[in-house]
Amino acid sequence: MLRIAIPNKGSLSGPASAMLHEAGYRQRKESKELVLVDPANEVEFFYLRPRDIAIYVSSGRLDIGITGRDLLVDSGADAEAILPLGFARSTFHYATRPGAAKGIEDFSGMTIATSYEGIVARHLADSGIDAAVVHLDGAVETAIQLGVAQVIADVVETGTSLRNAGLEVVGEPIMTSEAVVVRRTGATEDPEVDRFLRRLQGVLVARTYVMMDYDCRAEHLERAVALTPGLESPTVSPLHNEGWVAVRAMVPTVDAQRIMDDLYALGARAILTTAIHACRL
Ligand SMILES: Nc1ncnc2c1ncn2[C@@H]1O[C@H](COP(=O)(O)OP(=O)(O)OP(=O)(O)O)[C@@H](O)[C@H]1O
Ligand SMILES: O=P(O)(O)OC[C@H]1O[C@H](OP(=O)(O)OP(=O)(O)O)[C@H](O)[C@@H]1O
Ligand SMILES: [Mg+2]
């Protein structure tokens, strides 16, 4: 039975459970459930703190887990990201009060508050900056107002928390992050893990693509197919009306409306898109 670590709280928890549910796995009904067996799919889910997940996986006690790339790097655990999942996207930045530092080189001698000491200590060492790091569990933006630090290093998504605290970003992003599936570094191939990854990839594709069907005149087919090349190649079937064909291809959801306009302009008709609920490519 595959043993999988899942975030039990925070920004990663809801979207991770939603994705697993979409992939056909049982998920817990209430947040106090910490272990859940899904016998039909032969998996066991362990709901753990996202920060601890890479550590459990690197120990070999659990086969794989879902966590943030930043949490994986911060932990220093012997685990690697094997599939990006496209949610909990964020960047990791230094920030100060306006004018307190022109660049990160001005941080020497200052104190930096963060929940991600591992990332920050390594970045400072790599940049040759001698600054003190103080660990805080959260709400790090307030550390400057309360005089605990002159600089913070924290996750930024919309930037609202920084703005509300009157802070601004200094320097380039230290890293970008999103939810990832992690596995112990160098773990051997496992068909059960591959099946799990294929299911999640199916959800990612279903979320990113729609199926498009349309009819067009045979003489316009090449130009139409150039607009809808599909993932491998579109399906083309003859229509009862001579000189017309029906075309079916997957297209990226974000481009669907523009492609429909372009197909219509080419003379295609009965242009339909339908959602993909699940797939294996
Ligand atoms: N506002 C946000 N938007 C997107 N991703 C975020 C946001 N805040 C945190 N993350 C991501 O979520 C992960 C951190 O999850 P974690 O549960 O430790 O923190 P949290 O979501 O801030 O919850 P908590 O309230 O427990 O601090 C990291 O990968 C981080 O990049
Ligand atoms: O750029 P934004 O959209 O404002 O998002 C970033 C904020 O979200 C997270 O905080 P969270 O609300 O999880 O609280 P925490 O600081 O206690 O972890 C993160 O730590 C930042 O503070
Ligand atoms: Mg947080």
Image (cartoon, rainbow, N blue to C red):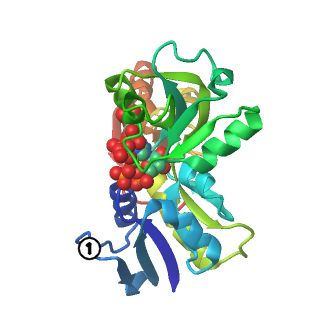
In the displayed structure, 203 sits above or below 208; it is: below
Q: Is residue 253 left or right of residue 92?
A: left
* Residue lying at 63% horizontally and 26% vertically, measured from the top left: 107
Residue 128, by quadrant, is top right
Place residue 159 in its image quadrant: top left
| Residue 132, horizontal then vertical, whole percent | 61, 39
Circle 1 crowding by C-alpha within 10 Å: few under 14, some 14–19, many from 20: few
Residue at horizontal 71%, vertical 73%? 187
Q: Nearer the viewer, residue 61 or 271?
A: 61
**Which residue matches tag 1?**
32
Is the residue 12 above or below the residue 186 in the image? Answer: above
Looking at the image, how many numbered discs can be counted on the residues? 1
Q: Is residue 167 above or below residue 161?
A: above
Q: Is residue 72 visible?
A: yes
Q: Quadrant of the C terminus?
A: bottom right
Asked if residue 131 lies left or right of residue 204, the reply is right
- Between 99 and 194, the one lying in front of the other is 99
Residue 114: horizontal and vertical position, in percent? 50, 42
Q: Position of residue 147 (x, y in %)?
A: 42, 31
- The answer to which of 186 and 206 lies nearer the viewer is 186
Residue located 55% across and 77% down the image:
62
Res 209 seen here: no
